[in-house]
Image (cartoon, rainbow, N blue to C red):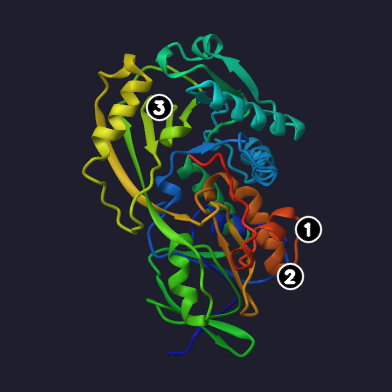
Amino acid sequence: MSAETTDILVIGAGAYGLSAAWWMGERATGARIMVLDAGDFGANGTGSCGAGVRMQWGLELSIGLMTESIAFFEDAARRLDYPDGIEFKQEGYLMLARDADMLADFQANVDRQNALGVPSRILSADEALKIVPELNPDLLVGATFCPKDGTVSPFLWLDALLRAVGRAGAEVRFGTTVTGLEQKGATIVAQTTKGPVEAAKVLVCTDWAAPRLLAPMGIELPIEAMPNEAMVSEPWRPTFGPCLVRIEHGLFINQLPRGSIVAVVTRELPKSESTANHADWLPLGAGLFVETLPALAHLNIVRNWSHPVSITSDMQPILGEMAVPGLFLAVSAYKGFMTSPVVGRIMADVVIDGRSDHPALAAFTLDRFATGELIPEPMVI
């Protein structure tokens, strides 16, 4: 079967893939852009996330990425010509400190964030309870709060990007699995379930599935799939605005605009691509939820789910061109949804121009794992 041809092939139509495709289209180079995704719209990691976006991180690189990304989310309706907006609820993150040592660590993070222009601050326990009176007061000695943090609808974000990508002239195909990649002279051929596609440049944005694609090309990726489990309650009256975080339990709680409350727990689990919840998940998740917000113990859980997320040993992305010319990689390491506005721009510059001046590109290379120059992010939930 003769191969279809395109100038740039993007593998993965999640937040990274669609954002990169849109930024490439915005460059108006005339390049033909094709995006392939194995699943349906919103069926993978982006569509399964907790929807949070925050500048409250521990490292300058992470803070910088999110400062840029939140600025884009604030203007996304205009930038992407999506008049109804992406349901950006900018009511902050409240990160709860269980003891004085944790609060001291949070203070160091806040100092770093403030130095970079992030308006986060330390709150006393009483101040935190004034913002969310339903919190269990026995759980906190204080908290940090940043009013510019918040949530975005993953589905509206993907839809806005998908429509904008289409207007930019790129083609997006769902239900098309890339089964292999091979170098063919100055091009790369992607074998897919719908026939081969040959491209001058290929950008892989499949996160935890990337190692299978790149290993036959001699590229070993230190990426694993970790199950991430979540549940959502029945709708309830508006009760709290900020996202709530208990970092010691990997707990994230968010009340959606429609009233339902999402709870996500990130924990050490056997690495797996399974989408099945563990048997202990509901007792654990519901128990932490009720412990945190005892006044909401009466709510019914209507759905729970699990989906693999990509992780690296320092929980930071891998970005850049690989050893195979024309082959590029953008793996999120669990931050793809929230960092996608700026990472999409970085990767568009790298794919089209071969370079980017953004400091994240120089830092988040694949080479750091061989040299041991890791950049661990301490505020992963």
Q: Badge 3 is on which residue?
A: 258
Q: How far is the residue under mark 2 from the one under mark 3?
A: 43 Å
Ranked by sequence position, the earlier of labels 2 and 3 is 3
The answer to whether residue 25 is seen in the rendering is no
SS type, badge 1: loop
Position in image of residue 188 (x %, y %): 56, 82
Are dots 2 and 1 in contact, CB under 8 Å?
no
Residue at disc 2, secondary structure: loop
Sort mark 2 into few (<14), some (14-19) or many (20+) by Cα contacts within 10 Å.
Answer: few
Determine the residue positioned at 28% across, 34% down: 284
User: Mark 3 Cα within 10 Å, few/some/many (few <14, many 20+)?
Assistant: few
The front one of 107 and 181 is 107
Q: Is residue 208 left or right of residue 375?
A: left
Disc ID at residue 315: none
Can you name the residue that lies furthest to the left here? 279
- Cα gap from disc 2 to disc 1, whole angstroms: 11 Å
Amino acid type at circle 2 is Gly
Residue at the disc numbered 1:
357
State the SS at label 3. Answer: loop
Q: Is residue 224 above or below residue 381?
A: below
Res 118 quadrant in image: top right
Q: Which residue is mark 2?
A: 354
Q: Residue at x 58, y 23 (%)?
A: 144
Residue ID at (47%, 67%): 210
